[in-house]
Amino acid sequence: MALLFSLILAICTRSAFLASPSGVRLVGGLHRCEGRVEVKQNGQWGTVCDDGWDMKDVAVVCRELGCGAANGTPSGILYEPPAENEQKVFIQEVGCTGTEDTLAQCEQEEAYNCLHNEDAGALCENPESPFSPVPENVRLADGPGHCKGRVEVKHQNQWYSVCQTGWSLRAAKVVCRQLGCGRAVLTQKRCNKPAQGQRSKWLSQMSCSGREATLQDCPSGPWGKSTCIHDEDTWVECEDPFDLRLVGGDKLCSGRLEVLHKGVWGSVCDDNWGEKEDQVVCKQLGCGKSLSPSFKDRKSYGPGVGRIWLDDVHCSGEEQSLEQCQHRFWGYHDCTHQEDVAVICSG
């Protein structure tokens, strides 16, 4: 009877938990993209039970933290120091589809029968590592960078081309997400000879909804059976992934803020900029905490040149990436470079 009551309570309180502000972090790993999974609720950090925990859940954690692809679901007890006894296990039975932006958007239950020996862990690619590989089962070949090119998939250690037949922008959206790139902006046949593939055709008649976690999750024609020619190779272009940097200082963790959008670096206007926005930048860069620089210190890095990408940025302080904060449309502003944001972090 007690167990039944706990089950009912968990179901009834699920929506209330999801509505609360949340965050996620990985603790005890070799880098910020590996470790025991912890979530924040009502100002307190607690762990996640590994009941129902799988690679789709890890993929969402990696995305929320701005890490690379999901690589594993290690046990959380492998990471030191272990969770403290008074620390609570907050959630269990997490059920992500793999396409959510945050763990809070996934189905989940309030934990009722888990101990810390069941803590979940996550292993993501570390984007700061110079050796971080591109996901191994899909790639964009022969393009300028890994976010533009001819679509190829890997099967049994061989790379194969993908036919344009049945392809859509929804399928391109899946590829861009899988590769850790920005949104899909173009998909077309690639008829010019230099960009055509010389590999065997393997996939055609793709039918993606756009919500799939990987291209391999999309319905398609039979693998390995295609009558397409290379004039029908699929070409996809994604926006470059969002990135930011601090420039003009003598350290990586202080300087004028610049963000990368559509492959171009540009500055950020200081209208309504404050401590919470500083915190998000320092967190995203792995540079510790904001040192709350004075107006004079901020202006010591000088004005930028070129594009001003963001204006009226507003963060709650919980975001893992500045891209998740509210702001005007990219490139819309009423600023000059004399108003460029600068940030100084403790790192």
Image (cartoon, helix red, strand yellow):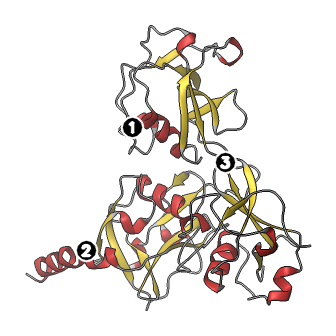
Disc 2 secondary structure class: helix
Left or right, residue 119 beside residue 78: left
Is disc 3 in contact with disc 1, using a CB cutoff of under 8 Å? no
In the image, which disc is placed on residue 15? 2
Mark 3 or 1 closer to N-term?
1
Is residue 37 in view from this perspective? Answer: yes
Left or right, residue 80 beside residue 105: right
Residue type indicated by callout 3: Lys
Which-is-in-front pick, marks 3 and 2? Answer: 3
Residue drawn at the location 64% of the way across and 15% of the way down: 196
Disc 3 secondary structure class: loop
Question: Is disc 1 surrounded by few (<14), some (14 to 19) or many (20+) residues within 10 Å?
Answer: few
Q: Quadrant of residue 167?
A: top left
Residue drawn at the location 32% of the way across and 70% of the way down: 92
Structural distance between the alpha carbons of marks 3 and 1:
28 Å
Farthest right residue in view: 250
In the image, which disc is placed on residue 217? 1
Q: Looking at the picture, does residue 108 appear above or below residue 17? A: above
Which-is-in-front pick, marks 1 and 2? Answer: 2
Residue receiving disc 3: 262
Q: Which of 26/191 is in front?
A: 191
Disc 1 secondary structure class: helix
Question: Is disc 3 surrounded by few (<14), some (14 to 19) or many (20+) residues within 10 Å?
Answer: few
Is disc 3 in contact with disc 2, using a CB cutoff of under 8 Å? no
> Quarter holding the N terminus?
bottom left
Structural distance between the alpha carbons of marks 3 and 2:
37 Å
Residue drawn at the location 69% of the way across and 30% of the way down: 143
